[in-house]
Amino acid sequence: MERRLQRRYVQLVQEHMNSSTRTAAGPSLLPAEGKAASATQAAWRFLNNERVEMAALAEPLRQAGRDAAAESPAEFVLLAHDWCKIDYSKHTAKRDILQLTHEHDIGYDLTTALLVDAHDGSPLAPMQVHVRTADTVYSTGKQIPHADDHHLDQLEPTMNEVESWDLPRQVVHVIDREADSLGDFRRWDELGHKFLVRCDDRRVLWEGESWLISEIADYFDREVAFKDVGEATHHGKTVRQEVAEADIVLHRPHKTRVKGKQIDVPGPPLPMRLIVTRLVDDDGYILGQWTLLTNVLGVEAYQIALWYYWRWKIESFFKLLKSHGQELEHWLQETGAAITRRLLVAAMACVVVWQLERDDSPEAEQAKTILMRLSGRSSKSTRPNTAPGLLAGYMALLSITDLLENTDCDLRTLTRLAKTALPFLDSS
């Protein structure tokens, strides 16, 4: 990215250091930026500039991911994959939106791969983004998916591209139940990829005999094979987490489609670890249970279960992009290309907040306290800092510092102006 565009990128990231409102048409403006119209025009030119490549916008995110992963004590780093809808059903100016499911389900389809710390579950950085429109897919990847590709077809190219990112830790791909596909498991394992997937019921070999996964889970329950591995949180309440595991083999043919017809394809037996994890309340009532398959060896079952639990950090990222921070679904850019560029800029603002959240130095703790006070947000005593609150506080702090550094105002002038505007503030 050329230097002029780089400067504009940095300024746009600063303008997205804010918890936006749904009525805001664009990024927040800093006091010294001049007229709103000229700043808005500059943002429009950047977001619609074809020379601003998606891969170039992804590189600062990937560098942040590399740096954060290098600081982690964990042997692995997690890459959580997920998909979500960007709802633009009320945006008539966008001509490239598509119908996702039913006739009222209109917008873009977003695919994201989020890097997550395998030590404590902290979100680090989004490393790959695809935005599917009615016409094409805008992507940060080397191999851009086709518009008609299934979600699973988007996974393997990203898995293969991970090696080019020079991450300092081995990657484990964590995916929800949509990726429960034996044919894909065999291919990913053959390519050397490590993965963790939530699975449905299927027939497997356990100790040489054929079992349904549900039957193995019931057996664990009857034989009291579940081990208590500590506390977890369920809907804000503290509960107990229990885990049991078995070494199983996926031995049956997998299914694929050839010319629209589903056929069975034989494949080699695939050894896997089956991990069953559940949450239990004080009365012994099972609040939730998940069955997981992984080809990762040498890691305790309870840690694998935590890895899957931390997959939900990508859902929190989607919320931060949408209703809890950036209000993505209310952006007024008129093309998928402009939306994708702005999304990558906004993602960098999220990464800055996550970096501050992870920092436990005295200076960072003081900064978080000040930012939350500047945000005007209330928070729980058990969680004094929130990402949306820190975003809102960042913009207030950036506005104050920008005003003091780039205008004739000083602190005394600002105090006098505040008292002039609101006389009751003057208690002298």
Image (cartoon, rainbow, N blue to C red):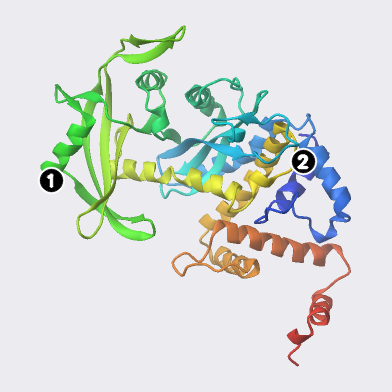
Image quadrant in which you'd find residue 377: bottom right
Residue in view at x 64 percent, y 66 percent: 375
Name the element at disc 1: loop
The residue indicated by pointer 2 is: 6
Residue sitting at the far left: 223
Residue 132 shows in the view:
no
Tell me residue 273's x, y (percent): 27, 31
**Does any portion of residue 259 appear in the rendered image?**
yes
Picture quadrant where residue 187 is located: top left
Q: Is residue 204 above or below residue 109?
A: above
User: Which residue in the structure is indicated by mark 1?
Assistant: 224
Image-quadrant location for residue 18: bottom right
Q: Position of residue 331 (x, y in %)?
A: 70, 44
Q: Residue at x 74, y 43 (%)?
A: 332
In the image, is 11 to the left or to the right of 321? right
Q: Residues within 10 Å of mark 2 (few under 14, many from 20)?
A: some
**Quarter the C terminus occupies:** bottom right
Residues 336 and 387: in front is 336
Q: Residues within 10 Å of mark 1 (few under 14, many from 20)?
A: few
